[in-house]
Amino acid sequence: MVKTSFQFIFLSLRINLSVSSGPYCEIYIDGIGTCWPRSNAGQMVARPCPEMLYGVRYNTTNNVYRKCQTNGTWAAKGNYSMCKPILEGEKKGKMHYQIAVIINFLGHCISMVALLIAFFLFLCLRSIRCLRNIIHWNLITAFILRNATWFIMQLTMSPEVHESNVVWCRMVIACFNYFHSTNFFWMFGEGCYLHTAIVLTYSTDKLRKWMFICIGWCIPFPIIVIWAIGKLYYDNEKCWFGKRAGVYTDYIYQGPMILVLVINFIFLFNIVRILMTKLRASTTSETIQYRKAVKATLVLLPLLGITYMLFFVNPGEDEISQSVFIYFNSFLESFQGFFVSVFYCFLNSEVRSAVRKRFHRWQEQHSIRARMTQAMSIPTSPSRVSFHSIKQSTSL
C-alpha cells in the first residue's frame, strides 16, 4: 500500500511537470478505483485495467480510457470496454493442464516399469538373441534412456533454472533430444529389417548388428551436436527449450526425425502389399513371425508419428479442441514406452516361449529339490528307529 502511494505521488509529480498552462483536469480517482492523473484539456488519457473488481480478476494488459474535456473536467464515464475478466475458461484450461501433467507422470512411470521388465527379459533370455530381438532390445533401451532424461528434466527444471540458462540444464535438454532422436532411428532400424527380410527377399544373414547400431545410436549424435552449436550461436536462452520466433534451429534434429518417419511409412506400405499378395497362403513359422512384427510396427508407427506431428498442428481456439489436444498428446507421449514393451516383448512369441520354458525348468528343479529334502528327512534304517526308541524308554 505504501509502495502504491509513492508510485501515485511520483506519477502525479511527473505529469504535473508535463502539463502546460491552461485548462486541465485535476487528479481524480473514480468509483472503480482507477487513478486518473492531472491532464491537459482535450486529452484522451489511458490507464491499465484494474487487477481485481468485485472479486473477479481482470487482464491488466489492456487499457481503460477517459476524456479530459476542453473545460477542464473529466468525462462522466470511462471506457472500460477493453477490460476483459479472466473467466472460468482460463481456470478450466489450467485445470486441464494440471490433469495432463498427472497423466504424463503416470504414463511415464507405467512405461518405465514395463520397459525395465522388457529390458531384463531380453537380457536374461540368451536363447532368443537373434538380430531381430537385438533390434527390439535396443529400441527398448532407447526408450528407457529417453524416459529417464524426461524424469530428470521434470524434477530439475524450474522457471528460475530456465531463465538462468546454466550449462547443466542445456546438457539435460540436449541429452533428452538425443535419446528422443534415437527412438525414431531405432524405429527406422525396425523398418529396415522388415523391409529387407520381406520385400527385398534378401537373406537377413547378410545384415549385421553394427549396421543397426550405427543407425540407432551413431547417426543421431552428430545431428544433435550440430543442433547444439546452432542453439549456442542463434538461440542461446531458456536452456535451449522451446522455439523462438524466426529461429528454426530445432528443425536440425526434427527434420531427420520426420524424414525417418516418412521412410518407415513407405517401408510399411511395401511390406503390407507384399504380405497381402504373395504370403497370404503361406503358413511357415517365419512368415507368421513377420506378420506379427508387421502388426506391431503398424500399431506403433502411428503412435510415434502422430504424437510427434501433433506439435505442428494448430488445435484451434475453442476449448474442446484445446482439451482434446492436451489429453490426446499427453497420453500418446507418455505411454509410448508401454506400447513398445507390450508389442515387442510381452506379446513376442519367442519371449513368451522362453519364459514358459524357464518357468517349467524352475518348477522341475524346485520339485526335485523338495523330493530330495523329503527323502532326507524320512528315517530309512531300522537300527536308527530302535536307537531312538531305546533312548526314549531309558529316559522314562
Image (cartoon, helix red, strand yellow):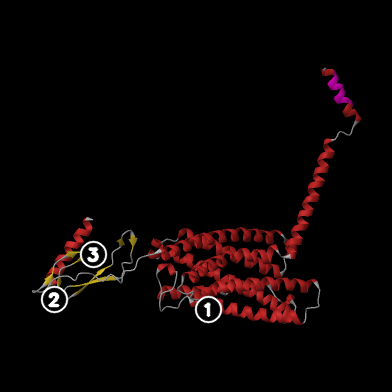
Q: Residue placed at 66% from the left, 74% from the top?
A: 298
Badges 1 and 2: C-beta atoms under 8 Å apart? no
Q: Residue placed at 23% from the left, 64% from the top?
A: 34
The secondary element bearing badge 2 is classed as loop
Alpha carbon separation for disc pair 1 and 2: 62 Å
Q: Which mark is residue 201?
A: none
Q: Is residue 153 left or right of residue 283?
A: left
Q: Is residue 394 left or right of residue 209?
A: right
Q: According to the image, label 1 marks what residue? A: 255
Of all residues shown, which one is farthest toward the front? 76
Q: According to the image, label 2 marks what residue? A: 70
Is 373 placed above or below 246 here?
Answer: above
Q: Amino acid at mark 3?
A: Thr
How would you rate the neighbour count of disc 3 (Cα within 10 Å): few for under 14, some for 14-19, many for 20 or more?
A: some
Q: Amino acid at mark 2?
A: Thr
- Quadrant containing the N terminus in the rendered view: bottom left
Q: Residue placed at 91% from the left, 30% from the top?
A: 382
Alpha carbon separation for disc pair 2 and 3: 21 Å
Nearer-the-camera pick, 340 or 42: 42
